[in-house]
Image (spheres, rainbow, N blue to C red):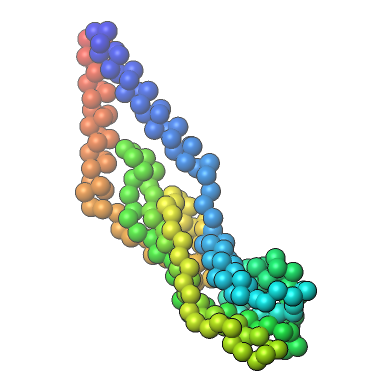
Amino acid sequence: MKGLRHSLAVLVTGTGLFTGAHAQDSAFAAATNLRVYQSLAASLADSLANLLVTADSPRVSVRIAPPDVAWFLQDAVERPFRGRNCVISGNDSARYSVEFGAVQMAVQYSNLRRNGFLGSRVVDRSIVLLARLRLVDRVPGIVVMTGERRGVFSDTIGLSEVERVEHAAVPATRGSIPPEDFFSGIAEPLVIVGAVAVAIFLLFTVRS
């Protein structure tokens, strides 16, 4: 009888451990998709800023295309140049001309699954930013660099976080959630029902 009581106590304690894991997972917030795009854009722009000829606060003009992404990418693209003491100019009198054209922006979710036994649902996230870059030095009149560069970010986030990391007004920040694996979907309720049945059986056995 003592052994049965111990088994029942272990089962209840185990349930408490799973609940604690859920609370711990919720303490870590993933970066929003918008913020990831900004980080990728800054990284791509940094590759252009590295090509600048050293000078005292050179003036740089930055153009972002298409216009509907400029409001959230402009500052990120300009940031590496400001870090090199460049003066951002809004006219053609600047020595350097930077063009940043977003060709592809996509968010993809995959591999929806449980994070451990009876854990919270998680999904793999991949964010891609493909941009056409162009850097012109107007003093000698040369194209310093032109071409396409790709930035990729990937991680794993909780399914419950998807709505928070997306931006309702920016379609490029949204992606489709894949269906959960069929066997994973039917195995979980069977495990739960089985665990409850065992607990009830042990409880009545102990009382008898």
Q: Please provide percent x and percent y for residue 56.
A: 78, 74
Residue sitting nearer the eye, 138 or 181: 138
Residue at x 55% of width, y 82% of height: 145
Q: Please provide percent x and percent y for residue 8.
A: 30, 18
Residue at x 57% of width, y 63% of height: 39
Decide if residue 119 is on the left or right side of residue 24: left
Residue at x 43% of width, y 54% of height: 155
Residue sitting nearer the eye, 71 or 164: 71
Decide if residue 85 is on the left or right side of residue 99: right
Q: Is residue 74 above or below residue 39?
A: below
Decide if residue 51 is on the left or right side of residue 4: right
The total number of labels drawn is 0
Quadrant of the rendered image containing residue 72: bottom right
Quadrant of the rendered image containing residue 14: top left
Residue sitting nearer the eye, 201 or 55: 55
Q: Is residue 175 above or below residue 208?
A: below
Residue extending farthest bottom: 141
Residue extending farthest top: 2
Q: Is residue 70 above or below residue 187?
A: below
- Give the quadrant of the C terminus: top left
Q: Please provide percent x and percent y for residue 190.
A: 22, 39
Q: Please provide percent x and percent y for residue 181.
A: 26, 53
- Give the quadrant of the N terminus: top left
Q: Can residue 34 be seen here?
A: no
Q: Can residue 58 be seen here?
A: yes
Residue at x 26% of width, y 23% of height: 200
